[in-house]
Image (spheres, coloured by chain):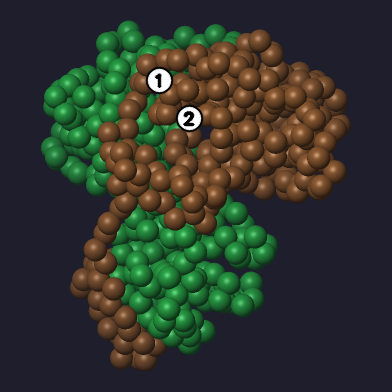
Chain colours: A brown, B green
Amino acid sequence: MNILVCVSRVPDTAAKIKVAGDNKSVETAGVKFILNPYDEYALEEAIQLQESKGGELTVLTVAGDEATDVLRTALAMGADKAIHVKANQLEKDSFYVANNIANVAKELNPDIIFLGKQSIDFDSFQISSLLGGLLDLPSVDVVSSINYADGSITGEKDIEGGKESFETSLPAIISVQKGIKEPRYPKLPQIMKAKQKPIEVKEAIETPLRTEILEMTLPEKARAGKILTGSDADIDELVRLLHEDAKVI
Amino acid sequence: MKVLVLVEEYNGSLKRSSCEAITAANQLTSSDNITAIALNASESALKSAGKYGASNAVNANESSIKGEAPALSKIISDYAQQNSFDTVLFAADSIGKEVAPRVSVKLEAGYVSDCVGLEVNGSDIVATKPVYAGKAQAKVKINTANNILSLRPNVFTAKVIAEGTEANYSEFTPTLDDKSKSVKITSISKNEGKLDVAEADIVVSGGRGLKEPENFNLVENLANALGGAVGASRAVVDAGWRPHSEQVGQTGKTVSPSLYVACAISGAVQHLAGMSSSKFIVAINKDADAPIFKITDYGIVGDVFEVLPKLTEKIKARH
């Protein structure tokens, strides 16, 4: 089975977000970047699939030069090779990224493409279904378990307040939910070995932006900030505030 | 602008998120340019789209599918193209988020997901969307002639603008090839009676400060008294106390209920990101310096083991 895993490089979840000087993007100086957490789950699912069925596991990102570090992390976890589609323009919309992935996928012809269910920077939740549309392939999102058969898979996906069981033919695109398989931490020998693994660099296909960021702001909501104690009288006051001020009870 | 809105029926009526999407469509154009479309819905539910401001309602009859994205996106794209719609709106729920990107490919349209605000600027749509799990928000302009948007549930208020008005009802028979039926939903299991944290109007969440998984019953009791859903911090999900489906935060769910009650949650950056857009925030924590208090409307500095039972009783006493 040939497997493609698409990854992205995102600010750490503990990072404080500041707006950059252009008022359109976020400050990257001093921010720690990591492999998107959901992509780690996608990689682990892919690695275990390769361990049981064989084939080649390729990891791919569409990003600027800085993203080499997350490709090395993915190679250390167990991917065989990496493709770095170099994006020269700073602002990329989801279509730009998906179109570049689709272009590589047409050459590689993977049996299955894995992604995290979303990248935790733009939370756009688009790439898997855009790929499905662009490649005219089935896609299923937020998958929490998979069983592999010959030429098809079955599995479960999360929906609001429950789960759905699905089946689909392969090739297919699967975006995974947290917890599908616990991601491994690469150990030093794997990290060293990953430095020898190939990273193929390709130039991105430039497409006009279909959506464009005009402005980035930090949400500001004035909060009452009223502090009470745990006394009976104060709990009564809280109930009154929830009823009269907030009108939620 | 000619706007198509994907709506869904639940228990005989339109889902609230569907009504919210129709209301939002009225910000973009006039009612006579708005059509609601549903898959296998009842005539009465679809006609009720009229009172929220959709003049037309179309039922796509295709009993062989249940909302699988490849099939449903083909139906919507075909209907939009055959009837010259330039804009399609979705609720940003599990169906909308899977279907909308595929429709955007077919219509060669820019797509902004999970919007919390919409403006029309001349002929352009500018949408506001939370990014970095709500730590920031972006104003995004759509540059293409066609527009696709999905709207975060619970943010746009559904408004009845024409009480008693029914939408003009019609039916559409889709044509689906084998390829569009490649994905099949074989069964659906819902946690009956359990509200999902992302859909609930009131959320009560618990954190590490509860000390033991069993103590979550205090959180559950308050949630029940308020008619809300139970949420959890990442720490307690990672510790295996609660399922991931309840996790609120950057690697869990982003919520914006009317009331969010954080119990014994200190307020890590990634948790705050997932709930700070809630309309009212209450925190109960014994540490007066906990970061959660920086974003609360009402904070109680106190012991959850004493405060929660008392608060639950007092709220029950109001009913």
User: Residue A91: image x %, image y %?
Assistant: 40, 29
Kind of residue at badge 1: Ser
Which residue is depicted at the point 77% across and 34% down? A195
Query: Image quarter for residue B200?
Result: bottom left
Which residue is depicted at the point 45% across and 75% down? B290
Q: Which mark, by number, is residue A8?
A: none
Q: Chain of mark 2?
A: A
Is mark 2 in CB contact (under 8 Å) with mark 1? yes
SS of the residue at dot 2? loop
Q: Which mark, by number, is residue A126?
A: 2
Q: Is residue A107 above or below residue A237?
A: above
Quarter of the rendering occupied by the C terminus of chain A: bottom left
Quarter of the rendering occupied by the N terminus of chain A: top right
Which residue is depicted at the point 32% across and 51% down? A218
Q: Which residue position is annotated with label 1? A: B104
Front position in the image: B203 or B67: B203
Q: How many marks?
A: 2
Can you see residue A175?
Answer: no
